[in-house]
Image (cartoon, rainbow, N blue to C red):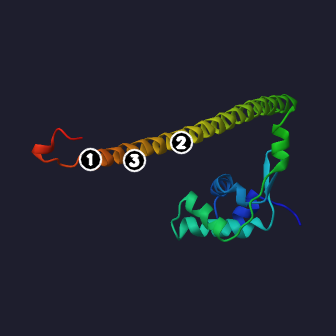
Amino acid sequence: MDWITINDISKMINTPVPTVRRYIQKHQAFLNTKREGKKILLHPDSVEVLKKIRKWYMIDNLIDTEIDSKLKADGYKLFIDVQSINQELDSSSLDFLKAMFKEQRAINEQLMESNKLLVKELEEIKQSYKESEIKREQRDLALMETLRSIQETKKLVAASEEKKKWWQFWKL
């Protein structure tokens, strides 16, 4: 199929050329476009999308973000212009990206090492907490045992010291 120029589309959908250019610029992700020099060409499938965009602007009074949302909701495909992306990526930008990835990898490795150290420290803290809990429980048990023995001793002392009558105080 032949690609269509903006002037031809303008006539097809009865819209001024600058408006068609604006639609293409704002909603390019949903339109299958390509460039030939300075010309922008659209695939014939994109004509229906442009008609819907025109209707939503003119009749429904929607704004750009609402139209994009409607296009996504209606299941229209997103197009990515790989040629323009490839032309924008030259060797210096590729070298820059490689350097950035290398730097990011080094940072990630440092973060992984620090995470390992933090996990190790956390395990040590957990272990010391468990040990302190065990020691505290042992101390509490020993304290309770001591209190029980003191109470038993007091009971024995109290039982042995019955009230003696006043005239028998010299007897043991």
Camera-nearest residue between 167 and 52: 167
Q: Which sits earlier in the primary sequence, circle 3 or circle 2?
A: 2
Q: Quadrant of residue 89?
A: top right
Q: Which sits earlier in the primary sequence, circle 2 or circle 1?
A: 2
Q: Left or right of 52: which side holds 158? A: left
Q: Position of residue 117 (x, y in %)?
A: 70, 32
Q: Residues within 10 Å of mark 1 (few under 14, many from 20)?
A: few
The structure residue drawn at horizontal position 64% and vertical position 63%, both measured from the top left corner, is: 15
- Per the image, label 2 sits on a secondary structure element best described as helix
Instruction: Check the image and report above or below for 85 versus 74.
Output: above
Camera-nearest residue between 13 and 117: 117
Q: Residues within 10 Å of mark 3 (few under 14, many from 20)?
A: few
Q: Which quadrant is the C terminus positioned in?
A: top left
Q: Position of residue 62 (x, y in %)?
A: 53, 64
Q: Position of residue 53 (x, y in %)?
A: 63, 65
Q: Which sits earlier in the primary sequence, circle 1 or circle 3?
A: 3
Residue 158: image tag? 1
Q: Would you say the residues marked 2 and 1 are in contact, meaning their CB atoms lie under 8 Å apart?
A: no
User: How far is disc 1 from disc 3 in space, using C-alphas?
Assistant: 15 Å
Q: Is residue 21 visible?
A: yes
Q: Which residue is mark 3?
A: 148
Q: Amino acid at mark 2?
A: Glu
- Per the image, label 1 sits on a secondary structure element best described as helix
